[in-house]
Amino acid sequence: MNPITWEEFYLRNAAPSDLESRKKEIQSFCQKFEPSDLRVVLITSGGTTVPLEHNTVRFVDNFSAGTRGSASAEYFLKAGYAVIFMHRYKSLEPFSRHFSGNELLDSIQVLKDDSLQVDPAKAPVLLPILKDRKEALDSGRLLMVNFTTLTEYLWILRASAEAMACLNSRAMLYLAAAVSDFYVPPEKMPEHKIQSTGGPPEISLQLVPKMLRPLVADWVPKAFVISFKLETDPSLLVSKSQEALKNYRHKVVIANELHSRKSRVTLVTPNSHHEIVLSKEELDAGVEIEERIINDLVEQHTSAMTTLN
Ligand code: PMT
């Protein structure tokens, strides 16, 4: 069955109540960089939820933790980009991603006089992360925007893309979020919590229209757009990525397979494709594949900007 059109999706699924204020924040972030020659990247990160009830108790979710997006944000900041980090609420974020559980609290010691001291053994790890974070915040180059549901994600994606249009070819969109392809339309959703006394529920999911199409063609037509393709069968990766490039006419698809995604990706463009692979030694030494991906994309963005301008 064909999905509804993207226009219909926005007509049938109400915008989040605070969309206008969020839109303004994103617009002023982009306008701040309009007169400069700084490049701005929108990174989407983490998974979207699909609520099963209007008063949501249960929802469909996916595996994405936001590792790819949050690491990439740090490397884009290092490369001099301003970053709109559009992430799933409570998923991994740049800088804090390096610490899990009580790791950060454990690195601070309480001394006898009740003063605090950073554990000298942990300081060399903490210092560069804190310095990079301070630089990003002081320079005003990082905007954090969060979402939870699929509908919220799609409304904010559109608002962000439209706000970035003023940046022309300096805008980049790096769509790493794991966005649900299926949802329960509002008219099919029960108002209250589904009761187990009614027996096993029959939940009919419907297709979500691919928003890459209007995003590339209408919302931000001069931007350098990169989408991701996730498969569990590696033999499908390149052909499906090429198909996506043909359909949506964007610049790059980063193809990754679920289990090897931290050590191997394929960058597919309309005319070629190449792999980025980390060796076991590099992984053990803490090299992150996002650093290589971002170096590659920054070069591609530079050459695309030269041809366009
Ligand atoms: O967060 P991690 O745990 O590090 O995992 C990272 C990742 C594996 C999630 C990431 O590397 C990745 O592959 N993300 C994209 C996964 C995905 O949703 O693929 P897809 O085939 O469903 O969608 C392909 C593209 O279409 C995506 O870039 C998406 O932005 C876009 N899309 C999706 C749904 C939709 N309705 N409209 C869209 O335009």
Image (tube, rainbow, N blue to C red):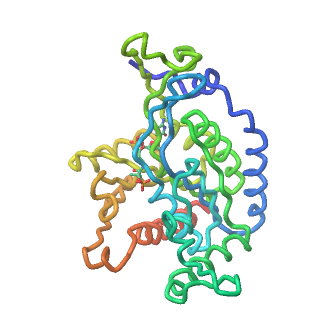
Image quadrant containing the N terminus: top left
Whole-percent x and y of residue 142?
67, 64
- Residue lying furthest bottom in this view? 120
Q: Which residue is at 53% across, 74% downward?
A: 106
Q: Nearer the viewer, residue 129 or 216?
A: 129
For residue 223, side relative to residue 37 (left or right) = left
Residue 303 seen anywhere in this rendered image of the structure: no
Q: Is residue 135 above or below residue 232?
A: below
For residue 283, side relative to residue 186 (left or right) = left
Q: Which residue is at 49% across, 23% downward?
A: 184
For residue 35, side relative to residue 90 (left or right) = right
Whole-percent x and y of residue 134?
68, 75
Whole-percent x and y of residue 306?
57, 67
Answer with the quarter of the image where residue 204 lies. Answer: top left
Q: Which residue is at 77% across, 39% downward?
A: 20
Whole-percent x and y of residue 91?
52, 53
Q: Which residue is at 70% across, 87% downward?
A: 113
Q: How many marks?
A: 0
Residue 182 seen anywhere in this rendered image of the structure: yes
Q: Is residue 73 above or below residue 159?
A: below
Answer with the quarter of the image where residue 282 lies. Answer: bottom left
Q: Nearer the viewer, residue 255 or 108?
A: 108
For residue 113, side relative to residue 292 (left or right) = right
- Residue lying furthest left in this view? 235
Image quadrant containing the C terminus: bottom right
Q: Is residue 201 above or below residue 132?
A: above
Q: Is residue 299 above or below residue 56?
A: below
